[in-house]
Amino acid sequence: MSKPEVLMIGPYPSWDMEDLESCYTIHRLWEAEDRDGFLARHGDGIRAVATRGELGASAALLKKLPKLEIVSCYGVGTDAIDLRFARENGIRVTNTPDVLTEDVADLGMALMLAVARQLAEGDAHVRDGRWAKGNMHLTTRVCGKRIGVVGMGRIGAAFARRAAAFDCTVSYFARSPKPDLPYAFVGDLVELARQSDFLVVTLAGGEGTRGIVTGEVIEALGADGIFVNISRGTTVDEAALLDALEQGRIRGAGLDVFLNEPAIDPRFAGLRNAVLQPHHGSGTVETRQAMGKLVRDNLAAHFSGQPLLTPVV
């Protein structure tokens, strides 16, 4: 029996590739110089797509795969996958939730601490010899501060638990209150920012959250406020954020996500009040191995007629 044919949009780590190649006939789209020609040659036989969250799977791509049954996404975000097209055409979609939650929340805390305590500046102060000439300027604490969490899903709740362990007061904005959580719900995002020392965005991406953190929200955070984003760059008015950072209208920002990744706005590189990361919230060996296994397990379940482990559609 021939192995099912799988189109891979981009590479996975070697430990995943080895397993996938032993179970399936893999078509490597990212290596094709002529993608349209590649799909014309192989599209009729492809039954599954394996993608990554930032690469997604557009309707234009899916239309070229008439026998497609499933899209398995390496990542929790599915905003780059055309879910409407998938639903309308009976294509299943899976992602990798839960396994990356704790690492993303960890990085959110790390960014908050790094900005507040100016860890990058302190590192430079030691390395370039300034310490021998005088102590570094004072920074601001995290313990006991007011934290506003924008989005209270899995990652938001994990971050809130960590913030509470720092004796912070946590409030949150979400589509609806979460009665099972011990944090205050604030239904107005501008008001949440006004009440917060740190505003931390953990929302899912997509059209429903695009630009939800407006310039007005950023202004409400104020000159002593710190902004952290571990969600998607699309959730924020990035131009307004850059202006506020450059002009000192907020204290600083810790950012793991941006518009136009990885070719981000060059203005970010000139900011001394921002700590930048390369969309690396899930970037640990442990989490990436668990993500890859979940992708492979979903594919295996589909082709063996078993229920999908983490269906989105």
Image: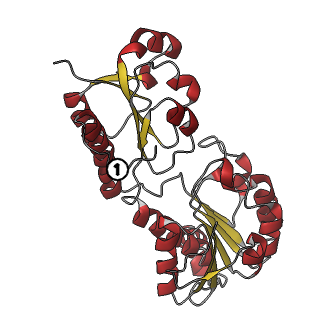
Q: Is residue 216 left or right of residue 295?
A: right
Q: Position of residue 293 (x, y in %)?
A: 28, 47
Q: Position of residue 150 (x, y in %)?
A: 63, 68
Q: Quadrant of residue 274?
A: bottom right
**Callout 1 amino acid:** Met
Furthest-left residue in this view: 1
- Residue at 36 percent across and 38 percent down: it is 12
Scheme of colours in the image: secondary structure
Q: Position of residue 254 (x, y in %)?
A: 61, 65
Q: Position of residue 253 (x, y in %)?
A: 66, 66
Crowd tier of the residue under label 1, counting other residues whose Cα lies within 10 Å: few below 14, some 14–19, many 20 or above:
many
Residue bearing mark 1: 291
- Residue at 28 percent across and 41 percent down: it is 296
The answer, for residue 37, to whether it is visible in the render is yes
Q: Is residue 39 left or right of residue 216?
A: left
- Residue at 62 percent across and 87 percent down: it is 145
Q: Quadrant of residue 144?
A: bottom right
Q: How many marks?
A: 1
The answer, for residue 134, to whether it is visible in the render is no
Q: Nearer the viewer, residue 176 or 108?
A: 176
Q: Nearer the viewer, residue 33 or 209?
A: 209
Image quadrant containing the N terminus = top left
Q: Is residue 76 left or right of residue 23?
A: right
Q: Nearer the viewer, residue 3 or 26?
A: 3
On screen, residue 24 above or below 301: above
